[in-house]
Image: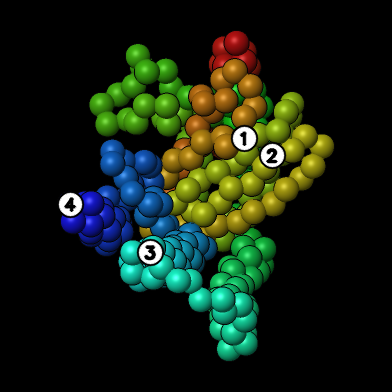
């Protein structure tokens, strides 16, 4: 009985966490005791989140069903209550059912799964093109239409200002306008890296010698962090991605300020990051 009570407590607390999950989710960055994904900032991430919740629900129902069957068999057919096992081997209806039902479940999963896959690869018309190049161990960003290129390097813990997250803050953030389609071309200059921003539902390998492409459309302003998500060497954990989503006016002002300081030299800090 105590065992059953404990089991019920486990199930109810898991259900509670599932319900409270969104409240605990990080916004733009991970948060302590976060359950589930970071809060979605793009339509694709919203789709990913609801697809995940849907699959999770199916898994939980299947697990509970199997658990129920196991408990039923243990109680109903144990040696004490059922000492003479029956010799039944086939049941046509049951066999048809346990073939058809899983097929239906798989079809129900496949439909939203393919819809999401097509949405991710259905590139909209670009409002802004951005190139992200992974190098050991920093990212270089380029705005080809605006002639802006800069390296973005992690700020060391000792240099953080109050409110800046550890291991995620960079010296120069990517700035993009809100509600605009941003096409990101992802490249690598040395080994395989991975451009990933959880709130945007973006995760794409940066492969040397290959031009990969992904896109996002951020629907609210704010700071959104990601990290290189492919083991790329000793300082893999120290090449964060920081994207600031701003209004159109702020973006125009930022472009102006960047063009004015276009001549800045990244060479010095890049050499430091490579060490
Ligand atoms: Cu990397």
Compared to residue 233, the image places residue 84 above or below, namely below
Q: Is mark 1 within 8 Å of ligand 1?
A: yes
User: What's the distance in space between the residues labelled 4 and 3, CA to CA?
Assistant: 20 Å
Q: Earlier in the sequence, mark 4 or mark 3?
A: 4
User: What's the distance in space between the residues labelled 1 and 2, CA to CA?
Assistant: 9 Å
Give x and y (percent) for residue 53: 42, 64
Q: Earlier in the sequence, mark 4 or mark 1?
A: 4
Residue 266 in sight: no
> Which residue corresponds to mark 2?
206
Taking 241 as reference, is 204 left or right? Answer: right
Q: Quadrant of residue 73?
A: bottom left
Q: Nearer the viewer, residue 171 or 203?
A: 203
Label 3: few (<14), some (14–19) or many (≥20) C-alpha neighbours in 10 Å: few
Q: Nearer the viewer, residue 254 or 79?
A: 79
User: What's the distance in space between the residues labelled 1 and 3, CA to CA?
Assistant: 50 Å
Q: Please tell me whether mark 4 or mark 2 is closer to you in this view.
A: 4
At horizontal 57% and vertical 79% (from top left) the residue drawn is 88
Label 1: few (<14), some (14–19) or many (≥20) C-alpha neighbours in 10 Å: some
Tell me whether circle 4 and circle 1 mark residues in contact (CB < 8 Å): no
Tell me whether circle 1 and circle 2 mark residues in contact (CB < 8 Å): yes
Compared to residue 35, the image places residue 104 above or below, namely below
Q: Nearer the viewer, residue 50 or 256?
A: 50
Identify the disc placed on residue 78: 3
User: What's the distance in space between the residues labelled 3 and 2, CA to CA?
Assistant: 57 Å
Residue 135 in sight: yes
Q: Is mark 2 within 8 Å of ligand 1?
A: yes
> Which residue corresponds to mark 1?
230
> Which residue corresponds to mark 4?
2
């Amino acid at each position: 009985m105590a065992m059953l009570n404990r089991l019920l407590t486990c199930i109810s607390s898991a259900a509670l966490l599932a319900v409270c999950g969104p409240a605990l989710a990080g916004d733009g960055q991970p948060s302590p005791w976060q359950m589930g994904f970071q809060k979605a900032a793009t339509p694709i991430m919203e789709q990913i989140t609801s697809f995940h919740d849907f699959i999770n629900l199916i898994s939980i129902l299947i697990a509970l069903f199997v658990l129920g069957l196991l408990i039923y068999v243990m109680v109903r057919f144990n040696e004490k209550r059922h000492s003479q096992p029956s010799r039944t081997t086939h049941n046509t209806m049951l066999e048809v059912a346990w073939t058809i039902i899983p097929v239906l479940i798989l079809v129900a999963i496949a439909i939203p799964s393919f819809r999401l896959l097509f949405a991710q690869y259905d590139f909209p018309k670009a409002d802004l093109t951005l190139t992200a190049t992974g190098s050991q161990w920093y990212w270089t960003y380029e705005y080809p239409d605006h002639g802006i290129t800069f390296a973005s390097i992690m700020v060391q813990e000792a240099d953080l200002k109050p409110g800046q997250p550890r291991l995620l803050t960079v010296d120069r953030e990517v700035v993009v306008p809100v509600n605009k389609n941003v096409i990101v071309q992802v490249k690598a200059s040395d080994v395989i890296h991975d451009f990933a921003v959880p709130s945007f539902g973006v995760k794409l390998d940066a492969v040397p010698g290959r031009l990969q492409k992904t896109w996002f459309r951020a629907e609210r302003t704010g700071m959104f962090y990601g990290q290189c998500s492919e083991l790329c060497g000793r300082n893999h954990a120290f090449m964060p991605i920081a994207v600031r989503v701003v209004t159109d006016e702020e973006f125009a002002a930022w472009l102006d300020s960047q063009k004015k300081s276009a001549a800045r030299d990244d060479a010095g800090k890049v050499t430091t990051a490579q060490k």
